[in-house]
Image (cartoon, helix red, strand yellow):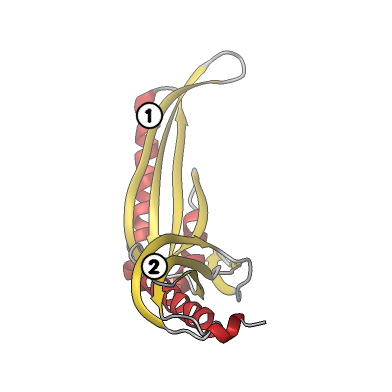
Amino acid sequence: MSVPQVAVRGEARLVVDPEIAAVVVTVTARARDRQTALERCRAGQAAVTAVLDAAGAAVEAVETAGLAVYPYRRDGGRDDSVASLTTSVTVARLDAVGELVVALGRLPDVAVSGPDWRLRPGSAVVERARLAAVQDAVHRARQYAAAVGARLTALLEISDVGLSGSSPRFAAPLAAMARFGSEELRLDLAPAPQEVLGAVEVRFAMSEPDQEVFGG
């Protein structure tokens, strides 16, 4: 005799503050010969490193993302050499992101993109989303079983559907300020809250339903 079962999908949606920010910094130098282009690129990168070092513990990780050296044909047919070095920066203190972006952006021959707001790899928020999805599945299954006069008796199967994340477009402004000589530059950055979606599929055995539920 088959055992009555109930299968449900549990879901959870958590919206939390970002934990880190990623900034990409690219130094590009152009010269008539490759050696000079590389030397200028190295000097530019040294300036970037000095800014990152000055940020102290606010900068969590610095990684070289790419190096390129290539010819560039100017108007008139003359070839120059271009050297480009890209660095990925992980910022641990969100209140320092704006000031750091301004400081990097004031350097010559430097392009800055970001910040990209993120959760840390292996963030505890991911585990919270998974567990909340399981709790939602149990709650739904109990409701369905109760609706037919039954109760849950055993867990038969649980399947991790997965997690996904996105960044909702709302946030409180984060002010950043830096001085350019006698001028003051202010950037208002808005850290985007992170949305983590968890889902599981769960199958339970349940007791025999109350036959009166099906009575006409």
Q: Nearer the viewer, residue 64 or 34?
A: 64
Q: Nearer the viewer, residue 170 or 80?
A: 170
| Residue at figure coordinates x 43%, y 72% from the top left | 4
- Can residue 154 be seen here? The reply is yes
Q: Nearer the viewer, residue 202 or 130?
A: 202
The residue pinned by badge 1 equals 36
| Residue 211 screen position, x and y as percent | 54, 83
Determine contact: label 2, label 1, CB under 8 Å. no
| Residue 3 screen position, x and y as percent | 39, 71
Any mark on residue 57, and which?
A: none
**Element assignment for label 2:** loop
| Residue 195 screen position, x and y as percent | 52, 68
Q: Amino acid at mark 1?
A: Thr
Q: Nearer the viewer, residue 56 or 7?
A: 7
The residues bearing labels 2 and 1 have C-alpha atoms spaced at a distance of: 80 Å
Q: Quadrant of the N terminus?
A: bottom left
